[in-house]
Image (tube, helix red, strand yellow):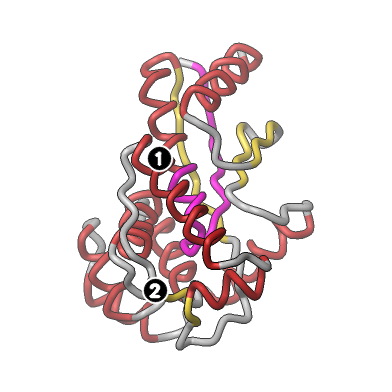
Amino acid sequence: MKPLEITFVSDVACPWCAIGLASVEQALARVGPEVDATIRIEPFELNPDMPPEGADIRTYIARKYGRTPDQIAQAQAMIRERGAAVGFAFGPRERVWNTFNAHRMLHWAGLEGRALELKRALLAAYHGQGRNPGAPDVLVEAATSVGLDPARAKEVAEGDEYAAEVREHERQWIDLGVSGVPFVLVNGKYAIEGAHPPESFERAFRQIAAAAA
């Protein structure tokens, strides 16, 4: 088997990251046993200055991107359609939240070998259920659901552990020129930007695997 080390740089608040991760995983399922793939989750904050109480999602999108209510509705419909195509169900989302605590929890989950599973759970909690992915109760529930220790998860969620590590990782990606997510880096040198369909990721993964051979 040919190795594929996939680094997935993303934010829990990003709907295209939910679509992108589902696409990557579908592509890897299609490639199957031809490759030995690992997915490493890396942090990126689209809204690092978002206050803890969050913001109304329509007001936020209108202010940040200059979109009208009709344009917002059309974009959300397209996101729901793209999500459904890769098996991700988007539900109603009324607010945008600060995700820094989610990234701290994901960092800890990575040390425990559960970052990918927790990433899926947090994406579903926010984009599927509209819950605050930075709230301690949501973080502990998600961590517990993927087999992490609930008592330790509570300590991480309610404290500030791994804050320095997360900020350092975020700085590294910004220094490398990453300005939008999802951003996928394969084998440390092949960059794929955006939430492509599974067939596009599959084609890229096969080409990279062949080059590695």
Q: Magenta stretch?
A: 2-20
Crowd tier of the residue under label 1, counting other residues whose Cα lies within 10 Å: few below 14, some 14–19, many 20 or above? many
**Residue 24's spot in the image, x, y percent?**
46, 34
Reply yes or no: does residue 194 show up in magenta: no
Q: Amino acid at mark 2?
A: Glu
Q: Quadrant of the N terminus?
A: top left
Reply yes or no: does residue 12 show up in magenta: yes
> For the view shown, which residue lies furthest in the front direction?
70
Residue at the spot of label 2: 94
Q: Is residue 196 above or below residue 171?
A: above
Between marks 1 and 2, how big is the CA–CA gap? Answer: 23 Å
Q: Is residue 16 above or below residue 33?
A: below
Point out the frontmost of discs 1 and 2: 2
Dividing the picture into quadrants, the one containing residue 192 is top right
Work out whether residue 168 or residue 74 is closer to the camera in this orientation and state it.
Answer: 74
Residue visible at 46% across and 28% down?
A: 198
Residue visible at 37% across and 51% down?
A: 113
Q: Quadrant of the C terminus?
A: top right
Asked whether, in this view, residue 23 is left or right of residue 152, the answer is: right
Work out whether residue 12 or residue 149 is closer to the camera in this orientation and state it.
Answer: 12
Query: Dot 2: what SS?
Result: loop
Residue visible at 32% across and 72% down?
A: 131
Q: Amino acid at mark 1?
A: Ala
Looking at marks 1 and 2 on the same chain, the residue that comes earlier in the sequence is marked by 1
Work out whether residue 124 or residue 159 is closer to the camera in this orientation and state it.
Answer: 124
Work out whether residue 144 or residue 99 is closer to the camera in this orientation and state it.
Answer: 99
Dividing the picture into quadrants, the one containing residue 60 is bottom right
Asked whether, in this view, residue 213 is left or right of residue 125, the answer is: right
**Residue 189's spot in the image, x, y percent?**
71, 33
Query: Dot 1: what SS?
Result: helix
